Image (tube, rainbow, N blue to C red):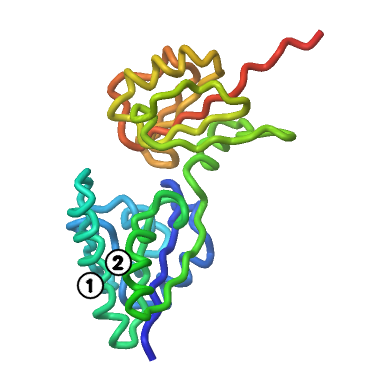
Amino acid sequence: MKGIAYGVGVGPGDPELMTLKACRLIRENDIIALPGKEPKETVAYQIAVQAVPELAEKELIPVYMPMVMDRAVQRENHRKGAELIAEYLEQGKNVVYLTLGDASVYCTFTYLQPYLHADGYETQLVSGIPSFCAAAARLNIPIVEWNEPMHVMPALHKLDEELDREGTYVLMKSGSHMQEVKEILRASGKDVQMVQDCGMPSEKVYRSVEEIPDDAGYFSLIIAKDAKQEQE
């Protein structure tokens, strides 16, 4: 029997937001994969080990996928990562790959899945609390109400468009270009709030565009909602 590769979301930062299923899979399996050169230095490990101290005694596999723009290099790194995991699956061992937030939202494990499937291995995604849900809870606001749509957008600075659709925008992974993002947000007329490092000791909350620093960190999540009309 071949092993199963699990992509497991550990939530956004607060170890108390890890699911019971995520904790159980970590406890029940000996091989834990993490996205980075040094597994114990990854954010996913640092979150999970607080909820499951036994993680420190597991066999940790580093799956290094550097952030590069060259698609050929990306694919080669994804193939290598899948091959590394497959070595354990072939031995009949399950591999639990830990990832931030939810395993189906911009998750590096999903880049490995096609290669694993092509080689005949089973994979499963295990949901975790996504960062935008945790950030909305931290801000104590709903993301959407009634029939409002929600638009989740990564790296907004790459988009040549305005935030002119009705509903709520969730902007992810735009920290390195925050000056550009802030200009787009100002022009939108929306009510803007941001949480940086949600659920982590370094967490910071910003309640307006003007409060958001230009040097905001990578784990910065913005929620931009339609301005509420004054009640008559």
Location of mark 2 (residue): 33
**Position of 49 compared to 231: left or right?**
left
Bin the neighbour count of mark 2 within 10 Å (Cα to Cα): few under 14, some 14-19, many 20 and up. Answer: many
Bin the neighbour count of mark 1 within 10 Å (Cα to Cα): few under 14, some 14-19, many 20 and up. Answer: some
Instruction: Identify the amino acid type marked 1.
Output: Leu
Location of mark 1 (residue): 84
Secondary structure at badge 1 equals helix
**Position of 160 compared to 34: left or right?**
right
Q: Position of residue 9 (x, y in %)?
A: 44, 58
Looking at the image, residue 96 lies above or below residue 180 = below
Q: Position of residue 25 (x, y in %)?
A: 45, 72
Circles 1 and 2: CB atoms closer than 8 Å: yes
Secondary structure at badge 2 equals strand
Q: Which residue appears at 54% of the width and 13% of the height?
A: 189
Q: Nearer the viewer, mark 1 or mark 2?
A: 1
Q: Which residue appears at 52% of the width and 51% of the height?
A: 129
Whichever of callouts 1 and 2 sits on the residue coming sooner in the sequence is 2
Q: Which residue appears at 67% of the width and 17% of the height?
A: 228
**Position of 185 compared to 68: left or right?**
right
- Which of the image's four quarters has the N terminus? bottom left
Q: Position of residue 143 (x, y in %)?
A: 61, 34
Indicate the quadrant where residue 150 lies. top right
Indicate the quadrant where residue 217 lies. top left
